[in-house]
Image (spheres, grey):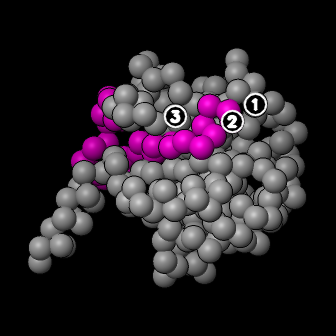
Amino acid sequence: MKTKEQIFTSIKGDLIVSCQALPEEPMHSSFIMGRMAYSAMLGGAKGIRANGVEDIKEIKQTVDLPIIGIIKNVYENSDVFITPTIKEIDLLHREGVDIIAIDATKRLRPDGKTISEIFPVIKEKYKDQLFMADCSTYEEANLAYKLGFDCIGTTLSGYTDYTYGTNLPNMDLIERLVKEFPIPIIAEGGIWTPAELRHVFELGVFSAVVGTAITRPMDITKRFIEAIK
């Protein structure tokens, strides 16, 4: 089993590729995500972010990189859907993902609790597990740091109802988090070009996640089509 230091050393200063496809998307398939992750590894990625135990199992068949695991699950009574309850954490922990990412926004979770109420319980239950806080604001990142998350991502900036319309990637937020917190800051969300990726590393991020721009051909195609309309 890799240590915390080994996992973070593996991804430091490098690219993590998010390989995900939801059920309504044409690429939805554990086999396809496994091939996508393998392609990303061959291309030089040093980590993979993946959704769901089946995809993660498939990816592990051919990819020996640190995995940030999530389970997206929609509950009627909450806007939180990235690893929203202990049930999803149990599944990811049992599968043995290196880092579990969870929504660390201020929104109420499906159980009616806040992240500050539930995360101490999570940390107590999974003492040796690394956790990434998917945040949308500086205040959420600050709370996540105080709660003891191992790393912080800007994943949800622009995706909560109080941050909609934010220009992505949120360079201002990324820069502030890098300056103020001594734990790894992972830039994620809206990184579309190599130039943007280079810029976030110039700001000092520990590592960065790119998803749609690499692994969603339908969305990539749409961008090209928009350019010629």
Q: Is residue 1 left or right of residue 74?
A: right
Give the structural element (helix, strand or loop) at label 2. Answer: helix
Do we see residue 10 in this rendering?
A: yes
Rounded to the nearest angstrom, the CA distance separating label 3 from label 2 is: 10 Å
Q: Which residue is mark 3?
A: 46
| Labels 2 and 1 touching (C-beta < 8 A) | yes
Query: Mark 3 or 1 closer to N-term?
Result: 1
Q: Which residue is mark 1?
A: 5
At 85% across and 46% down in the image, what residue appears?
Answer: 121
Examine the structure image and report whether residue 168 is included in the region drawn in magenta. no
- Packing grade of label 1 (10 A; few <14, some 14-19, many >=20) is few
Query: Mark 3 or 2 closer to N-term?
Result: 2
The span shown in magenta is 8-36
What x and y, as percent, mark residue 73? 53, 51
Q: Which residue is mark 2?
A: 8
Q: Amino acid at mark 3?
A: Lys
What x and y, as percent, mark residue 114? 78, 63
